[in-house]
Structure formats: structure tokens, C-alpha cells
Amino acid sequence: MGLSSTQALAENVTGMIVPLSGHWIPEEQPEFVIKQLANFFNQ
């Protein structure tokens, strides 16, 4: 699912490019994912 298709399903959707990652983003960039999730939930 792309950003535009998820925006139709939810009110608060954020999209971004994760550097140096492919299909397994949490495994390839765990620190980045943790930081972004923490920022999202602390809004």
C-alpha cells in the first residue's frame, strides 16, 4: 500500500523514505523505525 491509498483509510498518515533500506525496513533500519514510531506516538 502506498501513502495515497492509506490516506483514504486513516486520518493521521505519515509517509517518508527510509535511507539504506529495502523491503525489510524494521530489520534493516531498526533505530530509524523506533525513532519515527516514538515521534509519531508522542504527537
Image: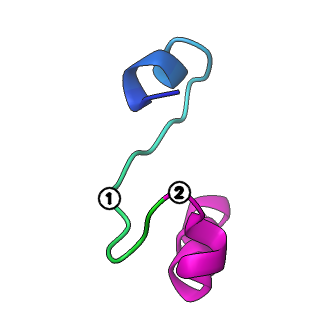
Would you place residue 28 above or below residue 11 in this image? below
Magenta stretch, main secondary structure, is helix
**Does 11 appear above or below 16?**
above
The stretch in magenta equals 23-43
Looking at the rendered structure, the kind of residue marked 1 is Ile
Q: Residue furthest front?
A: 23
Q: What's the amino acid at mark 2?
A: His
Tell which of 43 and 3 is nearer to you. 3
Determine the residue positioned at 53% across, 27% down.
1
**In what quadrant of the picture does the C terminus appear?**
bottom right
- Compared with 39, 14 (above or below) is above
Name the residue furthest top: 8
Q: Earlier in the sequence, mark 2 or mark 1?
A: 1
The kind of secondary structure element at disc 2 is loop
Rendering coords of residue 34 (x, y %)? 64, 78
What residue is pinned by disc 2?
Answer: 23
